[in-house]
Structures are given as C-alpha cells and as structure tokens.
Image (cartoon, rainbow, N blue to C red):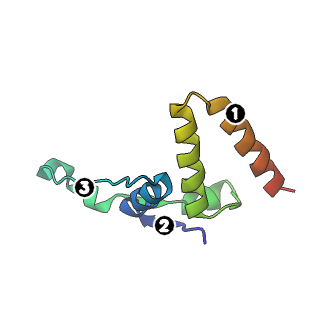
Amino acid sequence: MFQRFGVVCQLADLACKAWGSGATWVHQESNAELSESKLLLFDSNRVLKELAWKVKIDTREAVNLTVQWEKEVLKNESISIMDKQIDETLELQT
C-alpha cells in the first residue's frame, strides 16, 4: 500500500532491505542544532492535492525501483535501467 506520510527512517529501512547484502544504516545523534532530525518525515499529501498526482506504485515498490536504479548506476548501466523502468511505468498508465 502507498504511504502518504511516514518517518524517514522507515524509508531507510525499506532501502536497506531492498539493497540486500546486509545493508544497514545508523542514526547518529549529533548536537542540538540538528534536533529536527527526529522529526524528518515524508509527506506526499501536497503533491497529491496540488498536482492531482495519481499513485501508480506503492511506497515499497518505489523504494525497490530506486535501489535497483542506484545499483545499475554503480555498474554504469543507468541508461538501460532508466529505459526499462520508464517503459514499465508507462505500461502501468494504460
């Protein structure tokens, strides 16, 4: 299911799981200047409302596609994965 709102650490967890190979992330406490880091959220309600954006894939799938793309970029294959993902997304619209 698509999440319109959530805590950024949830996205980090999803990305690590999608990356595999034991990927992890660490939240490092720093100083009081960065106290907003405990409040970092993702929220797509504004884009849904103002742009009449329609959700085609859920949050987990979006993260999976992003991780897949990043892995291909690291192998210098970004153009082929980009073309493939665009084609797949266009198929969802029909």
Viewer-nearest of discs 1 and 3: 1
Residue type at the position of mark 2: Phe
Residue 24 quadrant: bottom left
Real-space CA distance between mark 1 and mark 2, rounded to the nearest whole angstrom: 31 Å
Q: How much space separates mark 1 and mark 3, taking CA atoms?
A: 33 Å
- For image coordinates 45% across by 59% down, the residue present is 17
Q: Which mark is residue 5?
A: 2
Disc 2, SS: strand
Residue at 37%, 55% in the rendered image: 22
Residue at x 79%, y 57% (from the top left corner): 92
Q: Residues within 10 Å of mark 1 (few under 14, many from 20)?
A: few
Q: Quadrant of the N terminus?
A: bottom right
User: Can you identify the residue that label 1 sits on?
Assistant: 80
Residue that badge 3 annotates: 27
User: Which of labels 3 and 2 is toward the front?
Assistant: 3
Residue 37, x across and y down, in percent: 27, 55
x and y percent of residue 79 in the render? 67, 30
Observer-nearest of 79 and 59: 79
Kind of element beneath mark 1: helix
Q: CA distance from mark 3 to mark 2?
A: 20 Å
Looking at the rendered structure, the kind of residue marked 3 is His
Q: Residue furthest front?
A: 21
